[in-house]
Image (spheres, rainbow, N blue to C red):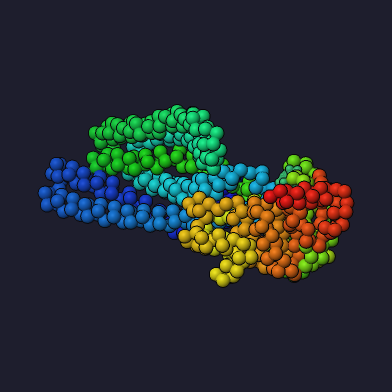
Amino acid sequence: MKDLKKLNKYFIKYKYHFLAGIIITIASQIFTVYAPKYIGDSITALQGFMQNTLGKEEVKSELIKNIIWIIATTLIAGFLTFLMRQTIIVMSRHVEFDLKNEIFQHYERLSLDFYKRNRTGDLMSRISEDVSKVRQYVGPAVMYSINTIIRMTVVIVQMYIISPKLTWYSLIPVPLLAYFMFVLSKQINQRSFLYQQNLSRLSSFSQEMFSGIRVIKAYALEKYKNKEYTELTDDSRKIYMKLAVSSALIGPLMIFLIGLCNIIIIYIGAQMFISGTIENIGVIAQFILYINMLTWPIASLGWVSTMIQEADSSQKRINEFLNEVPSISNLQPQRTTIEGNIRFEKVNFIYEDTGIHALKNISFNLDKGKTLAILGKTGSGKSSLLNLIVRLHDVTSGDIYIDNKPIKEVNLFDLRNHIAMVPQDAFLFSDSIKNNIRFGNEEATDEDIIHYAKLADVHRNIITFEKGYDTVLGERGLTLSGGQKQRVSIARALIKDAPILLLDDCLSAVDTETEERILNNLKQVAENKTTIIVTHRVSSAKNADYILILDDGKIVEQGTHQDLITLDGYYKDLFFKQLAEKELN
Ligand SMILES: Nc1ncnc2c1ncn2[C@@H]1O[C@H](COP(=O)(O)OP(=O)(O)OP(=O)(O)O)[C@@H](O)[C@H]1O
C-alpha cells in the first residue's frame, strides 16, 4: 500500500469532493435502511389484523403510510447514491487527468538515455492502463469501501437494536461468504493479470506487424506471421476460459450463501417467535431484507481488495518512472543570451550503456557566424558531436564552451532555443505540412512558412499537392519522399531563425542539383549564423570556413578545403572520387 501514498496529495487537493462524498454516503445508507423497517412494520400490522388487535381501516392507513415512506426514503436514497457517484467518481476522473498530465510532463523532462532503456509500449501502458487501474482505487474502490463500512455499521446496529440473538445467528455465514469471495477474487485477479499480459503481447505484436508491413509483404512472411498471431490468440482464449470459470462461480456462491442466511433467519426467527422472544413477525421479514442488503457489500470486499492490490502494483510501476531523475537538467536558473561561439576542449564521450567510445579528445574552435563541415566514415562520431552541443548527452571528460562559458553554465532552455537542428532522421508529425514547419516558430505567418519552404527548395513540391500546405502527413495522410521530408525538416529549422544551425546529414536524400540550390540559399540565411554541417559529400563541405574529418571518434584531418585537398588523406580521396562520379553522370 505504500506506493499508493503518492496519491494522498490528490485526496488533499480534492478534499471537498472527498468529504462531500463521505457525508453523502452516510446519509444515503441511513435512508436505505428505512425501507426494510417499513416493510417489517407493514407485516406486523397485518399480524395485528389477523390477531384482531388492529381494525381494517387502521391496517389500511398503516400500510398506506408505510408505502409512502418506502417510496420517499428509497427516492432520497437513490438521489443520494447518484450524488455519491457524482462526488467520488468525478474526483477520481480529476485525479486520473492530473496524474496523466504529471506523468506526461515528467516524460518530457526525462533524457534520451531513459527512452533508450524503456520500450515505447511500456511508456504508453503506464500512462494509460496503469493510470486507469489507479483511478479504480481512487474512485470505485474508495466509494465501495466507504459504502460497505457505513452500510455494515448502520444495518448491523439496526439489527442488533431489534434482536441481538437473531443478529448473531443470521451473521454466521457472512465470514464464509467474505472468505470465498476473497479467494475467488484473488484467482480472478491472477487470471486477469495473465490475460492482460497476453493482450499486451498481442497488441505489441500487431503494432510491430503494422509498422513492418512493407518488409512482411516484400518477404512474403504473411503465413508465418499469421501462425504466430494465431498462437498468441489461442493462448489468450485458453486463459480467458479459465477466467470465465472463476467469474461464473461468483453468482451461484452468492445465491447459496444468501439462501443459507435466509434459512437460518427463518428457522431461528420462527423458533424465537414461537417462544415469544420476538413479538412481531415483521422482524423476520426485516432481517431477511437486511441480510440481503449486506451480501453485496460483503461480496464486494474481495473485489475491492483486488482493485486496491492492482492499483498498488500499477502505482508502483508509475512511481518507478516518476522517481527517475533526468540525467540532463538545467543547472543555470538565470537566462543566458547566446551569440554562437562554440569551443570543444579535449572532449571525450562514451555511451554509458554500450561503452562505445564515440568521441576521443576532440578540440576545435568555431567563431560566431562561421561554418564548420564535419565528414567521416559511418559511425565515426559525427552525430554524437552534434548531440553534445544540444546537450542531448553530457561529455564524459573535457569541456564544451558556448560563448566562452562552460555549456552546463548556460541555461538549458536558452541553449536549445538558440539552436536549430535538423536531425539525420527527419521526423514529421501527423499534422499539416504548414504546422510541421511552424513547429520551429509558433508565431510564423503563412508568408514566413512559404518563404522558408522556398529556401529549403520544397515549396515547388508542396504546391503540387491538392491541399498544398494544408496537406496532412503521416498515418492517415500523405507520405512524403525521403528528400521531401528532409527539406520540410530544413524549413522547420530555418524558420526558427536561431544563431546556431546544426545540419546532420540532412541533404543525403536529395540530388546534387537540389543540394546545390539549398546550399546557395543557406548561404544567405546562415550568413550570420554559426553553422555545422555533417555530411558525406564534399560538395556540401567545400565552402565551409573549416572542415574536420573524423575517424573512429578522432579528428584525423582538419583545415580548409584548400588545406585538405593538398593532404593525401580521406578528404582528398573523397573529393576525387565524387568528382569522377559527377563527371560520369
Ligand atoms: N544512442 C547510442 N547509444 C550507444 N551507442 C551509440 C548511440 N548512438 C551512436 N552510438 C555509437 O557511437 C558511435 C558513433 O555514432 P554516430 O552516430 O555519432 O556516428 P556518425 O558518424 O554520425 O555515423 P553516420 O555517418 O552513420 O550517421 C557508433 O559506433 C555508434 O554505434
Vertical arrangement, residue 266 with respect to residue 12, above or below = above
Above-or-below relation of 89 to 526: above
Looking at the image, can residue 392 be seen?
no
- Residue at x 82%, y 65% (from the top left corner): 367
Along the line of sight, the residue nearer the viewer: 427 or 97:
427
Residue located 50% across and 62% down the image:
468
Q: Nearer the viewer, residue 327 or 45?
A: 327
| Residue 373 versus residue 350 in the image, above or below | below
Compared to residue 265, the image places residue 440 above or below, namely below
Which residue appears at 60% of the width and 69% of the height? Answer: 451
Q: Quadrant of residue 294?
A: top left
Give the quadrant of residue 538: bottom right
For the question of whether residue 357 can be seen, the reply is: yes
Q: Quadrant of the N terminus?
A: top right
Q: Nearer the viewer, residue 320 or 155?
A: 320
Whole-percent x, y for residue 415 in the image:
72, 63
> Residue 264 in the image: x percent, y percent?
32, 32
Q: Image point 52% across, 40% down: which residue?
A: 213
Instruction: Give left or right: position of 529 versus 153.
Output: right
* Count of number-bearing discs: 0
Estimate the x, y position of residue 521 in percent, counting from the top left.
68, 65
The extreme left residue here reads: 56
For this orientation, the residue located farthest to the front is 584
Q: Position of residue 81 (x, y in %)?
A: 36, 53
